[in-house]
Image (tube, helix red, strand yellow):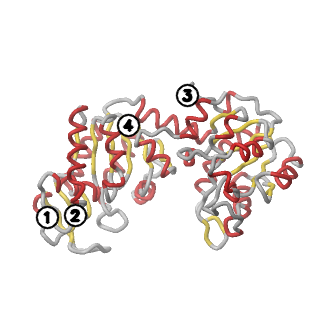
Amino acid sequence: MSAFKTIDDLDTRGKRVLVRADLNVPMRDGKVSDATRIDRSLATIRDLTETGAKVIVISHFGRPKGQRSPELSLKPIAAALAEAAGQDVAFAADCIGPDAEHVIDGMADGDLALLENLRFHGAEEKNDMEFAGKLAELADIYVDDAFSCAHRAHASTEAITHLLPSAAGRLMQSELVALTDALENPDRPVAAVVGGAKISTKMEVLGHLASKVDQLIIGGGMANTFLHAQGVNVGASLCEADMADQALAVMDAAAATGCEVVLPVDATFAKEFKEGAASQSGPVNMVPADGMILDVGPASIDDLMQRLATCKTVVWNGPLGAFEISPFDTGTNAVAREAARLTKEGALLSVAGGGDTVAALANAGVADAFSYVSTAGGAFLEWLEGKTLPGVAALKSAD
């Protein structure tokens, strides 16, 4: 953590602290339907208010494209934030200018405020320094607690760090520690579980992980393309036949670094993709012409559980099968629960995130049992791809 400051490194007592959170939460009938992101912001907010800081929260919401849009106002989220934080939240009808200044001028030490949607201003997504300057005028200190937005260079995540003393919030700090421990300085052996439908969306992920991990475990529809590339007939399964050469290239790259690519040895397949469809399991080279591989089979599950038992670190991105419908969630559930068990015993560091991963782990009942589960979809994937995240790089270079 020496590469960037955290809120422990700054004197926030009585200061105006601008906290970039991600409150882009799902709404239903005008109310927050899932407060996970709000709840995850509380550690930073509480630590700051307890020091007597005036905490000013900023966030985007949806894609208003630089236009004011009543349905994309953060005002309803202020009520949810107040309930979660257990204190009043003042709301400003704009994130800059007189409206914001008026609300902040009325704050006492330890108070909490929320400013209107950053993306009502087109300059936010343009990383405009003038707009960042108007945000910076509102505060003495900037805290970034939105790792999920770190893959975008926006005014509230990148430009502003050049204008105010800057630090990582608790959520950002937790994400960076978990990700560093998982891939940059891991306890080995390290396994990466990568699932999902298509390898075309995860070529960079696979290429980067092949140089970082000891075992690259591939599941879901992606595995069908790798099997096809090796000459296995996968029947009517989802398969990107035109990606066969790229799949083989991943295997060659992995072999060059000593990384073992692990594919299913058996599968559960069916003629229909629906809840409770009649299914059977068998070797991957015995899939009927009209059969669709929808999950890994029992032998593959046993193999993966034995592999986890030998690992010290696992990074998980994507399900092993069609986890949304039973019985094709069996493989994902079983392996995820074993990873959770090993984590609880202290034998495994488990970090997961991206895409359907959070939903798949929740379906298995282990979303809270991994060492760390990231809700930062795009940022998590770009980190898996080995890309530099502008929001993180800005914190590392900030004074």
**Which residue shows up at 17% across the image and 56% down it?**
228
Mark closer to the chain start, 4 or 2? 2
Q: Mark 4 falls on what kind of element?
A: loop
- Residue 46 is left or right of residue 206, and the answer is right
Q: Mark 2 falls on what kind of element?
A: strand
**In the rendered structure, are the residues bearing label 1 and label 2 in contact, judged by CB atoms less than 8 Å apart?**
yes
Q: Work out how far the residue at label 1 is from the one at label 2, CA to CA, in angstroms.
A: 8 Å
Mark closer to the chain start, 1 or 2? 1
Mark closer to the chain start, 4 or 1? 1
Residue type highlighted by circle 4: Leu
Relative vertical location of residue 154 with respect to residue 91 in this rendering, above or below: above
Give the residue pinned by disc 2.
293
Residue type highlighted by circle 2: Ile
Q: Which mark is residue 287?
A: 1
Give the residue pinned by disc 4.
348
- Residue 189 is left or right of residue 300, and the answer is right
Give the residue pinned by disc 3.
1
Q: Nearer the viewer, residue 301 or 314?
A: 314
Mark closer to the chain start, 1 or 3? 3
The residue lying furthest to the top in this view is 2
